[in-house]
Amino acid sequence: MLQVYLAGPISGLTQSEAIGWRGRARSILQQYGYAVIDPMRGHDSRRAEEALRADGHNWPYGPKAVFKRDKHDVERCDILLVNLTGASRVSIFTMMEMAWAEQWNKFVLTVMEDGNLHEHLAVREASSLVVPTLADAIKYLTEVHNQ
């Protein structure tokens, strides 16, 4: 069973914003036999509308645990699904996840619309494939990559 890690901006978003696309992707991908690794697992839903901080201090178990867990998740996944659509600021952690994935020769499927603020040669080169919408990424994973 291939494992897909759901990477993308989290800092500055509310938990419900960060969880939204991940829940939809997880639901579809699991139907096609993928195991999904979600960095939002374990977040306290009682604070669903509190913006998540980049320093990790309002994340469960603190910043070091989040960093190490997510790094381990990237190392053990087969595919990094990176959703950068609609980003309002550069996601530093996501860029690190992409670098780790490239270092470990993972398949990196990046979702990035034209004009996205993450448009950069490093993002393009670390990506195995770049598509403009999450629907395109899901279609690729369910119709092409999963064969």
Image (tube, rainbow, N blue to C red):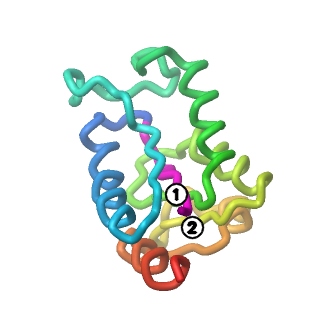
Place of residue 63 in the rendered image (x, y in percent of width and height, measured from the top left): 55, 19
Bin the neighbour count of mark 2 within 10 Å (Cα to Cα): few under 14, some 14-19, many 20 and up. many
Residue 123 among magenta residues: no
The residue under the point 41% across, 79% down is 139
Place of residue 20 in the rendered image (x, y in percent of width and height, measured from the top left): 27, 50
Depth check: 102 or 86 in front? 102
Give, as a three-letter code, the residue at label 1. Val
Q: Which residue is mark 2?
A: 109
Q: Is residue 100 left or right of residue 48?
A: right
Place of residue 73 in the rendered image (x, y in percent of width and height, measured from the top left): 59, 41
Instruction: Tell me, for residue 4, which label it has, or none.
Output: 1
Q: Determine the secondary structure under disc 1.
A: strand
Q: Determine the secondary structure under disc 2.
A: strand
The residue under the point 45% across, 73% down is 137
Q: Is residue 140 above or below residue 67?
A: below
Residue furthest right as drawn: 103
| Image: magenta residue range | 1-10
